[in-house]
Amino acid sequence: MCLFTNPSELCNHPECIRHYFSQYNTSTNNGSLIANINALIQQHSIALNDLTRKNNTLNQNLDTLTQELLKKTKIPQSNIEEPFSLEGIFRWISSGKTFSLFITLLNSFPDIIYKEKGFHVQVNVTDSNGSTVILPNSFTFIIALFTMENPPKLLKRNISGKKILRGTSEAIPEDDGIIHFRNVVVNEVTSHYPNDSFCLVILCPSLSHVKPLATSGISVRARKHNR
């Protein structure tokens, strides 16, 4: 049946199909012609089914390969929030975290802060509009000191090994929403540290949506003694 390869094979060459039609008279060989057309249709159907099966197999192989590549490829994560720690407070603040509340300073620091002489710090918590937010007194706010270097280092002890912060280093909100650190005592002068200054940070460790307050450039001098 094929003019080019095996004569006994069915084929779909256009030349062969035209030859079949020219060789058969529709009045005398109609039955044979219909049989050949049916055979061609069956051959096309088989070929189409085989192509569909091969295409499905190819798609399955591609899906499997893609899944394997995804398992082996580490996709970098962006905007991953830094876990909270007091030592890493500055990385935590700058990690892209969104804060809904803010600690605001209500009074000025003394012009000169002396070593071992207490001073008063008062803050409150505000929303994005600057309005005071009253928090229950079950939340504790703390003060921490850091060096003025990159990265800042948390200071717990002075150069003599004593606590660098004494007095009121923890406070809770009062009924009007103000947090009073009534007697903050720094037990070291800043001249022993980089840039001759400290960074004072006020935060509430249990409230991750409240942005800590960081005040840099805090200078502490030796206390003057009266003669």
Image: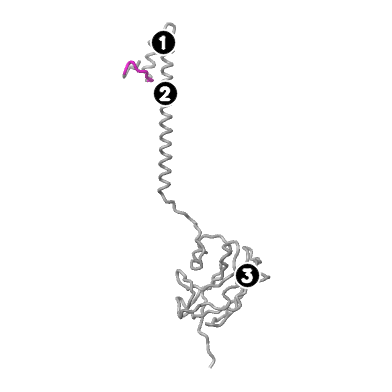
| Residue 214, picture quadrant | bottom right
Q: Is residue 54 left or right of residue 219?
A: left
Q: CA distance from mark 3 to mark 2?
A: 80 Å
Q: Quadrant of residue 201?
A: bottom right
Secondary structure type for disc 1: helix
Count of labels in the image: 3
Kind of element beneath mark 2: helix
Return the residue at label 3: 124
Classify mark 1: residues with Cα within 10 Å, few (<14), some (14-19) or many (20+): few
As for residue 98 lying within the magenta part, the answer is: no
The kind of residue tagged 1 is Ser
State the extent of the magenta-drawn residues as a range: 6-12
**Rendered image coloring scheme:** one colour
The Cα atoms of the two marked residues, 1 and 3, are separated by 100 Å
- Asked if disc 2 and disc 1 are in contact, CB closer than 8 Å, the reply is no
Foreground tag (2 vs 1): 2
User: Counting residues from the N terminus, which is met first, the one under dot 1 or under dot 3?
Assistant: 1
- Disc 2 residue type? Ile
Mark 3 and mark 2 lie on one chain; the one further toward the N terminus is 2
Within the image, what quadrant is residue 68 found in? Answer: top left
* Residue 157 in the image, given as x and y percentages of width and height: 48, 76
What label sits on residue 32 in the rendered view? 1
